[in-house]
Image (cartoon, rainbow, N blue to C red):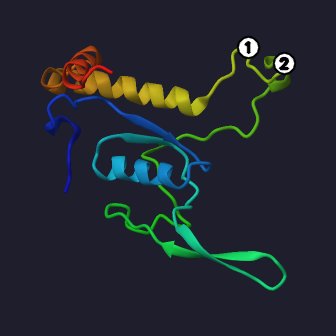
Amino acid sequence: FDLKACEVPGRCQVIVAIVDAGTCSDGESLAQALKARNLATIVGTRTWGGVIVTGDSVELVDGTSINFPTEGYYMRGAGWGLENHGVEPDVVEQYPPVFPGLEDSVDKLGMPQGPLRDPQLQRAVRVALGKISEEDEKKRGTGMSFQGLIYEANKTFPKL
């Protein structure tokens, strides 16, 4: 099953997902599903690789407990199980461990006060803009604008 975004009417949109080493569990599953079906471009760094479900646990004699994995996760298209490996991004963009001058850019509550730069977000925006300009002529005519999607959704779903 290989679904292309523009094969579904009204779904011809550019999607870029940002991931990093902190992306785990369902976030990894979503990123890999989008990538495997060519529905999005994944930008950032390789994800954590933590997708095994743990459910059963046993209490030990010292009062601690141990969890046992109950389900694994493998998706065709990745070439490997995501556990302990993660999702490889289409476009690698590192995120600096510390922003230079961060102390001068935030107030006492940690709220940004100055121009903090997020290189992964900036790269994702550049990728999205590039894809929009590349695909605009070919595919946008078959899709629906965001406003069109909202209009159709409002017609389809009952008012509460």
**What residue is shown at x 46% (from left), y 25% (from top)?**
125
**What residue is shown at x 47% (from left), y 31% (from top)?**
124
Per the image, label 1 sits on a secondary structure element best described as loop
Residue 92: image x %, image y %? Answer: 51, 44
Q: Is residue 19 above or below residue 105?
A: below
Per the image, label 2 sits on a secondary structure element best described as helix
Q: Is residue 29 above or below residue 82?
A: above
Q: Which label was assigned to residue 114?
A: 1
Residue 131: image x %, image y %? Answer: 32, 28
Residue farthest bottom in this picture:
61
Q: Is residue 107 above or below residue 34?
A: above
Quadrant of the image containing the C terminus: top left
Mark 1 Cα shell of 10 Å, populated few (<14), some (14-19), many (≥20)? few
Q: Is residue 64 above or below residue 61?
A: above
Q: Are marks 2 and 1 in contact (CB under 8 Å)?
A: yes
- Observer-nearest of 94 and 66: 66
In the picture, residue 62 is in which quadrant?
A: bottom right
Q: Which residue is mark 2?
A: 104
Which tag, 2 or 1, sits closer to the chain's start? 2
Q: Amino acid type of disc 2? A: Asp
